[in-house]
Image: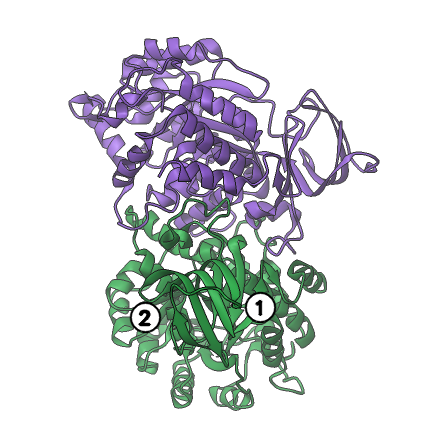
Chain colours: A purple, B green
């Protein structure tokens, strides 16, 4: 099949009248200055689809529900646990399908779902021990988004100076009891055309060091990406330093010497940036969450300058808008540095797409070139928001509402602002209503 | 005429099935639990229209054009001056009409236009000395937004330790040469049903202290609001302290003892918060601009705790989205304090509407109650963004795209997402295209 882009962002810059031939979900040929002919027209600016490298789909249930009593990250977590306690494979499927569809409408074409909601509330496995993971895979399939299921090892209730503490009541459903049991369960998951499996360890708070090594070894053996939450809150640093006399980054870099994706990296301590660079790691910033949860602002520019790749995630899905994440990253940098243009438009393009694809194990995505995954997003350049913008700067001026078309693996999932599932807001309303 | 709101935010909270009778642009009666009957239905949540207390409409031309070469506030200003140098009454009219229409689509029902682009590029007056101000008044009328024209006194090119410096080439068109001449020109402006006049002094950089006193006295005599840019950048503080041995706030509080609206207040120095509270002043935060221009984060919560009212402005119009400004205010506070919920939902409602109305001289706006201005905005509670939110928290989850209906002075300017002028994006494209 053939798509024709009014304008397209190619590795060398923006070109007009670009024909893209697609076979078996990949771009096979790119022809600039082509005629549209009988091709499917993609209006506006077509760029590689956005990568959402860090999501917890079920947190979507908390949107607009946690702003009335102040608090901190930790009090928010209590509210999140209340939702986590109630979900079933069926309600998770409905919520994730609607949330993933919201992501595709917003221009995300791949999601790294950081999944730790494994078992029954009692902690016992479902009859299918991967019932929850399978619900997410089915949800992504119906929503038309490429998925890396980052199946997460979660073993402990927290960390203090004396070591890891026991799981609390809600956390029991997160735990496989050991990294070995985690690996056995994960072995029963299957990949597909639009689905890959990846490994995650929740954090150094939730995974003791020996288990962390086991998870990292397992990921390396399988060629899977490895993700962890890292230094989102100073309390994690304090606990790691108190118990291990090392920063969370130092612990993980030691366990996972092949590189990993560190989510947040907000409160990196001295030396952590160099360790991340030396291990060829990627850091996933989640600006809307880091603001909403009052995490703080991480050292994004310093990481990039040290050679660390950055990518982005919507995390708790308080907002699902890749433009808001890009703008958040740049704005947070401006606020702390008092300088404008902390990232060039080209750097932001890579952060929004190719780096995220690499982080979730699809190294052949996030670019429009022969051989790459046919994952595309088209942006209206003549909306009230984008009118007048240089196309090269539209990442900083558009919003999710300006996405007109989305193609995932060659499938035209969103056409003229309409998702193939129909009324996504109604799916969200239905899924969320079912939880209350 | 009568509107019927599916839900409405009243001073006592959200009520269902609220009928609003409107005469001569004001709400005359509010009836909860009413039947819709033959009334015009406003779907979703109807709340008081958003107040945009600080705008420079012409900066809209810079959106998506200034992100490619780093820089600071001061280098951005050079780019802004390039646009300022070229505008005519006709091109300003076209640009402002489209920009004001974009504001109404986004839910703003009143704008305080901080206007200093008075004269021909040579500095000589137009045949109508208020040709540019009249262009803005005409633009607001066609766009259907309530306007306070904050006509701005601008006399000097800057401030250093030795005093004020001469105007540069571009700045000549900003200047009336003296506060007395400014007052004479402004006297020829007329108010109307949807138009008020207000006074502004650009800043302590651009207006020497004696002239500042004259502008403040003039505002007081006429019962006009008085606005100033205040401590947006540390360089302003440094210059004021070097030359006057006083902070910008101390200078203005002395000149304008009846209170004023300080725009930004990002870098307030010790004692400034108390001075602002003692003078019953209002501080207008412009979060999207303060992030975009790398200004920094002002002490919003400390101001509120001291008794200073806060309001919001879109300023350079890099974004026109009142929800993004509300979220920006709250997020910036969370980032600097590491606490969530820095403002209650009710505080944010007042900041977004009633306080802004008061700041621009319409003290009878920003509330849904008998006698108040009939300025309303309706928000879709079942969009992909808002589905599931508590209606009380929707300010933190919606976007401008979720505004369905806007009423200004009883006129139904936006219906089902459509502005009475038709295709606003095309008006923007036309106006911006004409400048290049």
CB of mark 1 within 8 Å of CB of mark 2?
no
On the rendered structure, is A169 left or right of B7? Answer: left
Evaluate whether residue B204 shows in this view.
no
Q: Which residue is mark 1?
A: B413
Q: Quadrant of residue B169?
A: bottom right
Q: Chain of mark 1?
A: B
Label 1: element kind: strand
Q: Residue at x 84, y 36 (%)?
A: A37
Tell me the crowding category of disc 2: few under 14, some 14 to 19, or many 20 or more residues within 10 angstroms, Cα based.
Answer: many
Q: Quadrant of residue A228?
A: top left
Rendered location of residue A258, percent (x, y) = 44, 16
Closer to the N terminus: mark 1 or mark 2? Answer: 2
Q: Which residue is mark 2?
A: B247
Q: Can you say whether B170 is above or below B177 in the image? A: above
Q: Which mark is residue B73?
A: none
Q: Chain of mark 2?
A: B
Q: Can you say whether A422 is above or below A204 in the image? A: below
Q: Residue at x 35, y 39 (%)?
A: A436
On the rendered structure, is A257 left or right of B269? Answer: right
Looking at the image, is mark 1 or mark 2 nearer the viewer?
Answer: 1
Asked if badges 1 and 2 are on one and the same chain, I answer yes
Q: Residue at x 50, y 38 (%)?
A: A427
Rendered location of residue B93, percent (x, y) = 65, 73
Tell me the crowding category of disc 1: few under 14, some 14 to 19, or many 20 or more residues within 10 angstroms, Cα based.
Answer: many
Rendered location of residue B368, percent (x, y) = 40, 70
- Give the number of callouts: 2
Q: Residue at x 33, y 53 (%)?
A: B333
Q: Nearer the viewer, residue B323 or A18?
A: B323
Label 2: element kind: loop
Rendered location of residue B279, percent (x, y) = 28, 77
The answer for how far apart the CA atoms under marks 1 and 2 are is 43 Å
Q: Nearer the viewer, residue A391 or B240?
A: A391
């Amino acid at each position: 099949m053939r798509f024709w882009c009014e304008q397209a962002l190619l590795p060398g810059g923006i070109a007009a009248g670009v024909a893209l031939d697609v076979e078996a979900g990949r771009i096979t040929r790119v022809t600039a200055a082509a005629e549209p002919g009988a091709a499917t027209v993609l209006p506006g600016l077509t760029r590689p689809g956005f990568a959402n490298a860090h999501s917890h789909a079920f947190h979507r249930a908390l949107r607009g529900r946690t702003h009335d009593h102040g608090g901190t990250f930790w009090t928010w977590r209590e509210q999140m646990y209340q939702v986590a306690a109630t979900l079933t494979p069926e309600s998770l499927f409905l919520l994730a399908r609607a949330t993933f569809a919201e992501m595709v409408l917003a221009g995300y074409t791949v999601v790294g779902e950081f999944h730790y909601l494994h078992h029954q509330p009692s902690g016992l496995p479902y009859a299918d021990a991967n019932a929850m993971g399978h619900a997410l895979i089915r949800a992504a399939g119906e929503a038309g988004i490429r998925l890396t299921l980052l199946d997460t090892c979660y073993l402990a209730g927290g960390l203090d100076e004396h070591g890891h503490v026991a799981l609390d009541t809600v956390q029991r459903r997160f735990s496989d009891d050991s990294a070995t049991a985690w690996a056995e369960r994960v072995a029963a998951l299957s990949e597909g055309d639009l689905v890959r499996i990846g490994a995650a360890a929740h954090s150094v708070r939730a995974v003791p060091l020996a288990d962390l090594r086991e998870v990292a070894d397992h990921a390396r053996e399988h060629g899977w990406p490895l993700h962890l939450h890292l230094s989102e809150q100073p309390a994690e640093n304090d606990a790691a330093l108190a118990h291990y006399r090392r920063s969370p980054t130092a612990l993980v870099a030691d366990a996972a010497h092949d590189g990993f994706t560190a989510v947040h990296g907000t409160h990196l301590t001295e030396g952590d940036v160099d360790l991340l660079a030396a291990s060829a790691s990627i850091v996933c910033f989640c600006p809307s969450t880091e603001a909403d949860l009052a995490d703080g602002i991480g050292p994004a520019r310093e990481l990039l300058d040290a050679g660390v790749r950055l990518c982005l995630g919507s995390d708790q899905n308080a907002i699902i808008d890749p433009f808001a994440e890009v703008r958040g990253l740049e704005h947070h940098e401006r606020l702390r540095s008092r300088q404008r243009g902390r990232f060039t438009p080209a750097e932001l393009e890579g952060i929004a797409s190719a780096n995220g694809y690499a982080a979730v194990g699809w190294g052949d995505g996030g670019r429009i070139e022969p051989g790459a995954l046919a994952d595309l997003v088209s942006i209206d350049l003549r909306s009230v928001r984008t009118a007048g913008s240089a196309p090269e700067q539209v990442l900083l001026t558009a919003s999710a509402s300006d996405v007109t078309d989305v193609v995932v693996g060659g499938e035209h999932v969103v056409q003229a602002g309409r998702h193939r599932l129909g009324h996504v807001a109604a799916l969200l309303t239905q899924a969320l209503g079912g939880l209350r």
